[in-house]
Image (cartoon, rainbow, N blue to C red):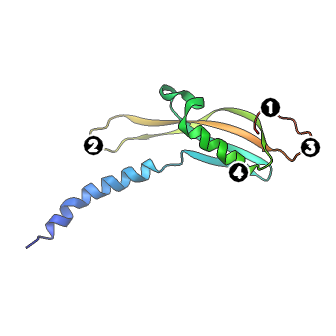
Amino acid sequence: MDSPCRISHWMPALYVVAALMIVGCSEAVMLTHETDRGGVVTYLFKEDRGGPMGSPHRREALKVMSSKCPSGYSVLKDGEVQGYSSMSSVEGAEGEVSGRRWGIQFECKTGGNDRSRAGK
């Protein structure tokens, strides 16, 4: 006969797994400051893994800009933006976890003779 204690024994482990999944599902790519004509897209990067240009999230950020601007876009400005930091609550992990974000401010092309520094 199974004891109800077995279920409660696994509950703390399930809470840890759920918390890790939520943290792992953070927004790696975000469209912020969105306007009718463009916006700012930001994405996570790590300096020791290729920096902002080598980030696997850069490709997704460019896709977001292309989806927002089917006729193409112009990059107005790009650079590091304020990231985030948090203290680890996982047992055995110490210190602060920080994420660095790169931002790209862009404007959609309307066709014709738009000024263009980058984009499609």
Name the side, left or right, on which 90 lies relative to 67.
left
Taking the spot 11% from the left edge, 71% from the top edge, the residue there is 2
Which amino acid type corresponds to the residue marked 1 in the rendered image?
Arg
Q: Where does label 3 land, which residue?
A: 112
Mark 1 and mark 4 lie on one chain; the one further toward the N terminus is 4
How far apart marks 4 and 2 lie (CA) works out to 41 Å
Q: Is residue 82 above or below residue 67?
A: above
Mark 3 and mark 1 lie on one chain; the one further toward the N terminus is 3
How far across and down, in percent of the image, does residue 89 sit? 34, 45
- In the picture, which quadrant includes the N terminus? bottom left
Q: Secondary structure at mark 1?
A: loop
Which amino acid type corresponds to the residue marked 4 in the rendered image?
Ser
Q: Where does label 1 land, which residue?
A: 117
Q: Are marks 4 and 2 in contact (CB under 8 Å)?
A: no
* Front residue of this view, candidates 98 and 73: 73
How far apart marks 3 and 4 lie (CA) works out to 19 Å
Taking the spot 65% from the left edge, 37% from the top edge, the residue there is 103
How far apart marks 1 and 4 lie (CA) works out to 19 Å
Q: Where does label 4 land, which residue?
A: 67
How far apart marks 1 and 2 lie (CA) works out to 48 Å
Which amino acid type corresponds to the residue marked 3 in the rendered image?
Gly
Q: Are marks 2 and 3 in contact (CB under 8 Å)?
A: no
Q: Where does label 2 land, which residue?
A: 91
